[in-house]
Structures are given as C-alpha cells and as structure tokens.
Image (cartoon, rainbow, N blue to C red):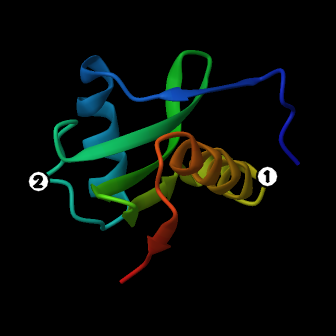
C-alpha cells in the first residue's frame, strides 16, 4: 500500500503538463488535447516526480473522467485508489455532482 508520507497530492499546474502528457502517452491514453483550460487534473508526486494523474472535463454540474494513469513502478500500491478518492473530493469541491466515464 501507499506510504502517505511518500506521496504529495495536488492540482496540476502548467509546469506539470509535459510530465502528465508523457505519462498518458506511455499509458496509451489520449494526450494531445490535454490543457488546463479544458481539464482539471489531480497529480500524485513522489520525490517531486509525477507518478499518477487523473483529470475531469467540466460540463456544469457534470464531469467526464479523463485519463487516469499510474506509472508502472507504482502500480499495485494503492496509488490508483488514492487518486480516485482525491479526484472525487476535488469534483465535489468544484461543484460537480455527477461524474461520467466513457
């Protein structure tokens, strides 16, 4: 499981986008249209490096889950579950009442 002292969880900032795009590309997920104007991301960092991300596209009170990914070396350690929990709290905080997944 995740040692919570090892990982920092926060909203993605512009400087994070190259690392987020790289992680999404390596995870075979769409990455070309990623921008902070359209998608709000939560990132997980260990040693100041992004090890996971999850995003939401905003549509009023609805959100579309976009591009959840975890680095291979961090899989099966609870990072994905923790990312999802942070994501759902974030959605609630910004007024999203329903989240959809395609």
Question: Counting other residues with Cα less than 10 Å from the Cα at mark 2, is it few (<14), some (14-19), or many (20 or more)?
Answer: few
- Which residue does the numbered mark 1 point to in the structure image? 77
- Which residue does the numbered mark 2 point to in the structure image? 32
The x, y position of residue 58, in whole percent, is: 30, 55
Quadrant showing the C terminus: bottom left
The x, y position of residue 31, in whole percent, is: 20, 55
Quarter holding residue 61: bottom left
Q: Residue at x 79, y 52 (%)?
A: 77
Quarter holding residue 3: top right
- Which mark's residue is nearer the viewer, 1 or 2? 2
User: Is residue 29 depicted above or below 55 in this figure?
Assistant: below
- Ranked by sequence position, the earlier of labels 1 and 2 is 2
Q: Is residue 54 left or right of residue 59?
A: right
Question: Counting other residues with Cα less than 10 Å from the Cα at mark 1, is it few (<14), some (14-19), or many (20 or more)?
Answer: few
User: Is residue 4 depicted above or below 25 in this figure?
Assistant: above
Q: Residue furthest left?
A: 32
The x, y position of residue 12, in whole percent, is: 39, 29
Q: Is residue 35 left or right of residue 97?
A: left
Q: Secondary structure at mark 2?
A: loop
Q: Nearer the viewer, residue 61 or 38?
A: 61
Q: Residue at x 38, y 66 (%)?
A: 62
User: Is residue 62 depicted above or below 5 in this figure?
Assistant: below
Q: Secondary structure at mark 1?
A: loop
How far is disc 1 from disc 2 in space, using C-alphas?
28 Å
Q: Nearer the viewer, residue 78 or 10?
A: 10
């Amino acid at each position: 499981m995740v040692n919570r002292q090892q990982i920092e969880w926060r909203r993605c900032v512009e400087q994070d986008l190259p690392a987020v795009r790289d992680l999404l590309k390596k995870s075979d997920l769409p990455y070309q249209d990623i921008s902070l104007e359209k998608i709000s991301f939560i990132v997980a960092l260990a040693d100041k490096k992004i090890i996971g991300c999850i995003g939401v596209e905003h549509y009023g009170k609805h959100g579309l889950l976009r591009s959840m990914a975890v680095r291979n070396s961090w899989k099966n350690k609870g990072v994905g579950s923790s990312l999802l929990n942070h994501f759902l709290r974030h959605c609630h905080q910004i007024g999203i009442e329903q989240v959809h997944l395609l």
